[in-house]
Image: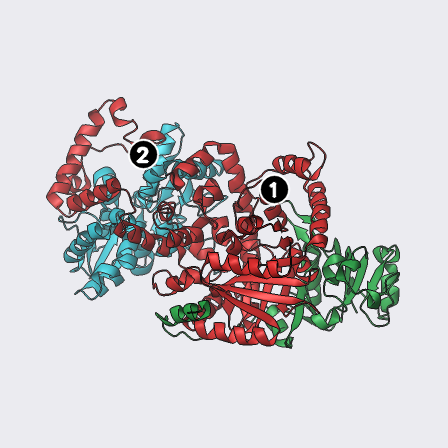
């Protein structure tokens, strides 16, 4: 049985702990041997995405030290996992256990469909749900076919959610347009970031979504900030929070 | 050092790693290439005319109102005379201005994009003829519609100091608010007769 | 110096207009999707185009020499220009030696990059841009805001007003058909009176020594075939090895950029008109230097289709002028700072790195990866504000030390909810201008996990 290191992104740890708990519970209930190494902090993405490689490198090195020993590493964040799989090579190439880490770090949904081989999701979620297909998970981890690609369609997130009884995944007019969070972009290009976010919310609203669901809390944090400022009715939920109540097998 | 040498030298330093050319592409095929050609030509703003069994170009042309009513017609198709235009007497391509219709033979057509290939040697005495006239009629052999552009390029023979053009439909623009307008600078209409 | 953030905020402030601009471009993106979905081998085509460009760039000098040999055998005169200044001087010299006082031009982003028009105009040569969109912005004395749809930022009423003043159309008339007809007549006059035509080059073919130009309007053909003198300007990266390769690129170009299977006119100029002259000016202007940079050389594969702009959620809501460079959008945000890192330092950050551009690029340029890579270049050049670099250094410091991180997090969650709103939200908190900050939970995940049953 593989031992799984649980990686909880810094902002999830501090601001959305219930997403971390839900993730832990989902993995534990599958019978996996899950451990949360306490010394973890961050994957280094905010620094790396700002071009501050020097600040990001030590954080990446720590990540390898802490998580290198696990068979699998799972995280409820597409962008953090993308950081490890697609950008760590720059600093960690050749280091012991890096190749293993790179090949065995997974976002939660893809872990459930591809590794844990979950085929049955037995639960209820009688709500209209708009799927926020966050960009890193979509175009870096390929959790689904992006609307730009001309290949047969698939969507690992949708695959897990549609089995829930009562759920209706609504059709957006732009199924995978960026929400505008983009890390420091949210602050550095505040006007465009918020215009993009408001447009996403409008799309979800017009499609009738009560819940905006995603696999990246950073995007949902940004959308939620806009929603609450303008007193709109939608609530944001991480996919882990939705799946937590179901039985997965 | 000449600019030529400077540029070539600069390119020969830091040469990227060698990389092979890819294998040729197997392009799309259509069960009914002519139908595909017609649909695509229509969307591009053109019109397809399928000649009747007799394959008599003169009578097909006579059925076209824009041909029948044109004051000046330039024909590059052997057997079809020009009307009020003596192409051989026109030394300056600017003097082609004012011609209403040009009838030009195309070598073949391409189903996927309704393009018609016209080799430069067809466009005598001046290659501007296809763009300066108000209306184009292209005559293409019906048996010469290929499926895709890869097949098209296999057919083209290149000679030195030449010209060749794929024309797909009439001249058009969408530069004003993405609103499609037919007849920008070139032909206001493009009729393809399949013979 | 204002960068993208300030300019785009001004553009987005008129939300109706920004949405209109966004919708116009999204429409073109949808047309691209519809066309691409009809080609089962679409992704294979992109892969082939990428491979052809990679191969060509690995032997660019050889292919350029082959092109030159064959072009000369076609009776084409070939010139080489190291930079923009030389390009302009060469073009001017060719025109002046033929006594040209009026030039018609079809679309060439290269000549925009070199600022050719003002150079020629200062030397007594009238230049008319003949692409309708280009003519519109030329009359408005503005640069193009998109490389394929230069006037996409303008409403028909604004164009109507412009044409009323410049072309004498009816006041208040804004029907695109009416306005285009007026432009047809006006530009026909320009074509008839020009002594030379200048075109860009979509593709230069080494094997044939000829060039290919794609238009919907036919303006390149009119300009290159009526006057006796044809000048074609190309960047060194426009080369492809064989004529057969054109099929790959031409199947991708219009589908990607405008959502059409092909443009109205695809002209293969392998020589001058009868009794005329044809010149090709091959321009470097920094391209050979990019070839030497592993992280950025793939940007040389760009075929200037505009698909990246059409899909970019930031470009659609910022408009081309927010970038302040000849070529805007994702590809422009890599090309511009190559030219002047300090001046264009804001551009690689004018992106959420969503990656849509990379997925639509017909030659599979890894645009969003290059944008990220350029951020690092800018930090190393200290072209990024000190404040930001310090902030990231502090963050890196804290996040490398778990106890410091836990303490910081705990303090944040304890203090922020107790602060009055006026302290939380203010100019020091750009997040909070249009958004609420996240609700601060009393306990972190780490705290909760201690209570979690095993």
Q: Nearer the viewer, residue C3 or C191?
A: C191
Picture quadrant where residue B131 is located: bottom right
Letter of the chain that mark 2 sits on in the rendering: C
Picture quadrant where residue A104 is located: bottom left
Q: CA distance from mark 2 to mark 1?
A: 41 Å
Secondary structure type for disc 2: helix
Can residue C262 be seen here? The reply is no
Q: Quick check: marks 2 and 1 in contact, CB under 8 Å? A: no
Q: Which mark is residue C342?
A: none
Letter of the chain that mark 1 sits on in the rendering: C
Q: Quadrant of the N terminus of chain A?
A: bottom left
Q: Which residue is mark 1?
A: C139
Q: Quadrant of the C terminus of chain A?
A: bottom left
Q: Is residue A198 left or right of residue A72?
A: right
Task: Name the spot of residue B114 as percent of width and height, x first.
Answer: 67, 63
Mark 2 Cα shell of 10 Å, populated few (<14), some (14-19), many (≥20): many
Instruction: Give the letter of the cyan chain.
Output: A
Q: Which residue is mark 2?
A: C431
Q: Residue sitting at 30 percent across and 28 percent down? A: C427
Instruction: Give the letter of the green chain.
Output: B
Q: Residue sitting at 69 percent across and 60 percent down? A: C227
Task: Name the spot of residue A88 as percent of width and height, x first.
Answer: 25, 58
Task: Name the spot of residue A128 as percent of width and height, x first.
Answer: 43, 39
Q: Nearer the viewer, residue C312 or C273?
A: C273
User: What is the residue that sits farthest to the left in this orientation?
Assistant: C403
Structure colour scheme? by chain
Instruction: Give the letter of the red chain.
Output: C
């Amino acid at each position: 049985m593989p031992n799984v290191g649980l990686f909880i992104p810094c902002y999830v740890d501090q601001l959305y702990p219930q997403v971390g708990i839900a993730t832990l519970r989902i993995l534990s209930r599958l019978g996996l041997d899950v451990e949360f190494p306490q010394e973890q902090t961050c994957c280094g993405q905010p620094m790396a995405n700002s071009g501050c490689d020097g600040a990001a490198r030590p954080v990446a090195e720590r990540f390898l030290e802490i998580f290198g020993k696990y068979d699998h590493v799972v995280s409820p964040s597409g962008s953090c996992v993308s950081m490890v799989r697609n950008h760590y090579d720059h600093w960690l190439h050749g280091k012991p256990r890096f190749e293993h880490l790179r090949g065995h770090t997974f976002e939660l949904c893809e872990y459930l469909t591809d590794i844990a081989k979950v085929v049955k999701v037995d639960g209820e979620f009688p709500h209209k749900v708009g799927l926020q297909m966050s960009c890193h998970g979509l175009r870096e981890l390929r959790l689904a076919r992006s609307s730009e690609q001309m290949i047969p369609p698939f969507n690992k997130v949708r695959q897990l959610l549609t089995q829930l009884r009562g759920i209706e995944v609504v059709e957006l007019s732009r199924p995978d347009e960026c929400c505008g969070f983009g890390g420091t972009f949210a602050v550095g290009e505040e006007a465009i970031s918020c215009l993009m976010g408001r447009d996403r919310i409008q799309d979800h609203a017009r499609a009738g979504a009560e819940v905006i669901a995603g696999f990246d809390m950073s995007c949902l944090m940004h959308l939620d900030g806009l929603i609450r400022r303008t007193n709109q009715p939608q609530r944001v939920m991480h996919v882990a929070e939705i799946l937590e109540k179901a039985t997965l097998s | 050092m000449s600019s030529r040498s400077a540029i070539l030298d600069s390119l020969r330093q830091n040469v990227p790693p060698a990389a092979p050319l890819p294998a040729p592409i197997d392009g799309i095929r259509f069960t009914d290439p002519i139908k595909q050609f017609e649909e695509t030509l229509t969307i591009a703003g053109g019109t397809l005319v399928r000649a009747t069994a007799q394959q008599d170009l003169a009578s097909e042309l006579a059925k076209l109102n824009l041909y029948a009513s044109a004051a000046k017609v330039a024909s590059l198709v052997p057997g079809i005379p020009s009307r009020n235009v003596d192409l051989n007497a026109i030394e300056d391509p600017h003097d082609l201005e004012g011609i209403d219709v040009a009838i030009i033979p195309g070598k073949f057509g391409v189903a996927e994009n309704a393009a018609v290939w016209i080799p430069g040697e067809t466009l005598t005495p001046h290659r501007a003829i296809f763009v300066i006239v108000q209306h184009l009629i292209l005559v293409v052999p019906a048996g010469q519609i290929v499926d895709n552009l890869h097949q098209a390029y296999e057919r083209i023979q290149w000679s030195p100091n030449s010209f060749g053009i794929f024309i797909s439909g009439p001249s058009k623009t969408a530069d004003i608010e993405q609103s499609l307008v037919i007849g920008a600078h070139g032909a206001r209409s493009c009729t393809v007769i399949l013979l | 110096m204002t960068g993208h953030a300030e300019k785009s905020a001004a553009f987005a402030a008129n939300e109706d207009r920004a949405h209109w601009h966004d919708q116009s471009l999204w429409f073109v993106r949808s047309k691209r999707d519809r066309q691409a979905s009809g080609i089962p081998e679409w992704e294979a085509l992109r892969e082939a185009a990428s491979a052809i460009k990679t191969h060509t760039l690995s032997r660019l000098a050889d292919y350029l020499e082959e092109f030159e040999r064959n072009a000369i055998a076609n009776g084409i005169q070939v010139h080489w220009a190291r930079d923009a200044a030389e390009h302009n001087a060469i073009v001017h010299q060719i025109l002046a030696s033929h006594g040209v006082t009026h030039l018609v031009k079809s679309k060439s982003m290269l000549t925009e990059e070199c600022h050719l028009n003002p150079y020629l105009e200062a030397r007594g040569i009238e230049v008319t841009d003949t692409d309708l969109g280009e003519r519109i912005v030329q009359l408005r004395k503005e640069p193009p805001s998109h490389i394929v749809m230069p006037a996409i930022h303008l409403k028909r009423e604004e164009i109507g007003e412009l044409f009323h003043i410049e072309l004498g159309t009816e006041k208040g008339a804004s029907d695109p058909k009416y306005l285009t007809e007026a432009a047809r007549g006006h530009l026909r006059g320009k074509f008839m009176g020009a002594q030379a035509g200048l075109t860009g080059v979509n593709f230069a073919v080494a094997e044939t020594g000829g060039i290919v130009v794609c238009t919907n309007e036919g303006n390149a053909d009119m300009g290159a075939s009526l006057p006796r003198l044809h000048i074609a300007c190309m960047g060194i990266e426009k080369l492809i090895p064989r004529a057969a390769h054109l099929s790959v690129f031409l199947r991708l170009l219009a589908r990607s950029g405008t959502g059409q299977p092909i443009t109205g006119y695809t002209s293969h100029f392998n020589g001058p008109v009868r009794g005329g002259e044809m010149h090709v000016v091959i321009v470097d202007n920094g391209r050979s230097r990019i070839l030497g940079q592993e992280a950025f050389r793939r940007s040389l594969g760009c075929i200037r289709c505009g698909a990246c702009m059409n899909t970019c959620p930031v470009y659609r809501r910022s408009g081309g002028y927010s970038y302040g460079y000849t070529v805007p959008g994702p590809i422009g945000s890599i090309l511009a700072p190559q030219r002047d890192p300090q001046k264009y330092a804001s551009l690689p950050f004018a992106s959420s790195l969503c990656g849509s551009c990379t997925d639509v690029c017909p030659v599979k340029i890894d645009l969003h990866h290059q944008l990220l890579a350029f951020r690092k270049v800018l930090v190393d050049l200290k072209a990024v504000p000190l404040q930001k670099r310090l902030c990231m250094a502090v963050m890196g410091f804290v996040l490398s030390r778990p106890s410091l991180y836990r303490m910081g997090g705990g303090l944040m969650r304890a203090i922020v909810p107790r602060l009055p709103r006026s302290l939380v939200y203010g100019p020091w908190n750009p997040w909070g201008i249009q958004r609420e900050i996240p609700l601060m939970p009393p306990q972190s995940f780490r705290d909760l996990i201690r209570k979690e049953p095993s």
